[in-house]
Image (cartoon, helix red, strand yellow):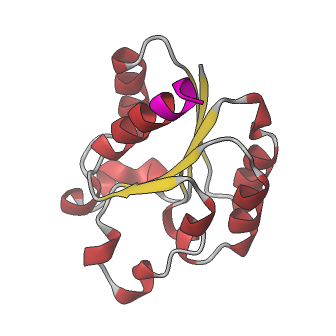
Amino acid sequence: MKLLILNGPNLNLIEKRESNNYGSLSLEIISQKLSEEFPKINFTFVQSNSENELIEQIQNADKFDGVIINPGGFTHSSVGLRDALETLKIPKIEVHLSNLASREGFRKNMITTSKVTGYISGLKEISYFAAVYSLSKMIEHG
């Protein structure tokens, strides 16, 4: 099984951000822990601060079995990411480290979330593990 994990802006700075919202593990450590926890899954892990690069990744994601995306702040503003996700026909899960429902009002407007199979929010790094588990079950059961 091949999964693409996309991470949006500022997620390269997790360990420098508010740990009560984002946890304290870097994306690199999260990636390593996912590979250890799910050794039969081939992960491609991408982080970009560029909306264009994330859209390109989504447009070429049909070679994967599923996608996990943490669009970061783009979830609240990117019609381009939303439209790219809409065209992608493989299972996709959106994750957020922080609990968006308990944050500022503008974070409750999630443009991209309506175009994914499901979303997980507020579990810090565990959000990624829950998404991998969920995607793998969806893919196994067709």
| Residue 110 can be seen, yes or no | yes
Which residue occupies 53% across, 24% down?
Answer: 140
Total of numbered circles in the picture?
A: 0
In the rendered view of the protein, which quadrant contains the C terminus? top right
Q: Quadrant of residue 111?
A: bottom right
Q: Quadrant of residue 9?
A: bottom right
Which residues are drawn in magenta? 137-142
View extreme (front): residue: 141
View extreme (left): residue: 20
**Image x and y of residue 5, in percent:** 56, 39
Position of residue 102 in the picture relative to residue 127 (left or right): left
Which residue occupies 58% across, 68% down?
Answer: 114
Q: Of 22 and 90, which appears nearest the observer?
A: 90
Establish if 44 lies above or below 134. above
**Image x and y of residue 68, in percent:** 54, 43
| Residue 26 can be seen, yes or no | no
Which residue occupies 70% across, 30% down?
Answer: 64
View extreme (top): residue: 40
Establish if 105 lies above or below 31. below
Position of residue 81 in the picture relative to residue 75 (left or right): right
**Image x and y of residue 54, in percent:** 70, 52
Question: Is 139 within the magenta?
Answer: yes
Q: Of 140 and 121, which appears nearest the observer?
A: 140
In the rendered view of the protein, which quadrant contains the N terminus? top right
Prevalent SS, magenta region:
helix
Question: Is 69 within the magenta?
Answer: no
Q: Of 140 and 71, which appears nearest the observer?
A: 140
Q: Of 87 and 102, which appears nearest the observer?
A: 87
Which residue occupies 81% across, 40% down?
Answer: 60
**Image x and y of residue 105, in percent:** 37, 88
Establish if 121 lies above or below 23. below
